[in-house]
Amino acid sequence: MDIIEAIGKRKSIRDFKDDPVPQNVLREILEISCRAPSAMNTQPWEFTVVAKDTLDSMRQAAVDKLTAGEKPRSEHCVAGWPSDSVYRLRQIELAKSLFQLMDIKKEDADKRSQWIERGFRYFNAPAAIIICVDRMLAEGTPIFDIGAVTQTICLTALHYGLGTCIEEQGVMYPDIVRKFCNITEIKQIVIAIAIGYPNWDFPANRLETPRESVDTVTRWCGFE
Ligand SMILES: Cc1cc2nc3c(=O)[nH]c(=O)nc-3n(C[C@H](O)[C@H](O)[C@H](O)COP(=O)(O)O)c2cc1C
């Protein structure tokens, strides 16, 4: 797949077929993605790929905590926008579009919590990639690099017919991830990527999220 086509085609996938992803395919995706740039070639990413019974146990444990009312909180929080900001407005627009496609009404508390649960279930993906960084690195320093490798994984996955969803929800009970994936305390758990073959019949997978126009987000200096 041509790179421009891949960038245009990548989108978040929030339901997957049951088909497992072969380990060698996941390995190849990671090998290719490690070509991502990093500050001074430090390559601060560390992957844990999880599937089958281990992933199922993680899904169940996370949903149990959620149902018990334990507040989810990741070790590297990516959310938290001022309530009167454009960022919050974009977040609301996203939720509205997803709920419309999924036919979830604002007042339907059950369906809304089922939707939230879906993220903690890794969107039923047959595999998830957990990305960690060593805590010896200063807080926030490797995040640019992690972003670069994360997007590279998502783009590379398309070549194999796979879909992905980058998800903070997948690491919002870090103690569970740590326990089932055997991740030591010296590693900070940053982000998860749900990965698998997309279920194209799932309404939310039809979503095409909008983007601001380049003119809105770009200033040109030194041009006519
Ligand atoms: C750092 C990061 C964290 C995200 N966390 C979640 C998440 O927890 N749950 C979810 O449904 N989507 C999550 N997403 C996906 C975004 O909602 C999605 O990328 C955005 O709406 C743009 O849509 P697109 O990926 O389809 O282009 C996350 C994306 C990023 C980059």
Image (cartoon, grey):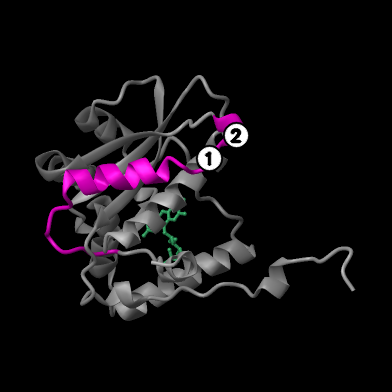
Residue found at the very far front of the displayed protein: 2
- The residue at the point 72 percent across, 74 percent down is 215
| Res 90 → quadrant | bottom right
Ligand 1 is in which quadrant of the figure?
bottom left
Q: Is residue 154 left or right of residue 163?
A: right
Please say whether residue 119 is one of the residues in the magenta stretch.
Answer: no
What amino acid type is highlighted by mark number 2?
Ala
User: Mark 2, residues whose alpha carbon is within 10 Å: few (<14), some, or many (≥20)?
Assistant: few
Q: Is residue 172 visible?
A: no
- The residue at the point 27 percent across, 42 percent down is 27
Q: Is residue 30 left or right of residue 54?
A: right
Q: Is residue 61 above or below residue 221?
A: above
Mark 1 close to ligand 1, CB under 8 Å: no
The residue identified by callout 2 is 39
Mark 2 close to ligand 1, CB under 8 Å: no
In this view, the residue in front, 52 or 83, is 52
Please say whether residue 35 is one of the residues in the magenta stretch.
Answer: yes
Q: Is residue 115 above or below residue 40?
A: below
The residues colored magenta run 14-41
- The residue at the point 39 percent across, 50 percent down is 153
Say which quadrant the C terminus sits in.
bottom right
Q: Look at the numbered disc 2 and give the secondary structure of its residue.
A: helix
**What mark, if any, has residue 74 been given in the picture?**
none
Say which quadrant the N terminus sits in.
bottom left
Q: Position of residue 209 (x, y in %)?
A: 46, 73
Q: Position of residue 170 (x, y in %)?
A: 32, 46
Q: Is residue 164 above or below residue 105?
A: above
The residue identified by callout 1 is 145
Q: CA distance from mark 2 to mark 1?
A: 7 Å
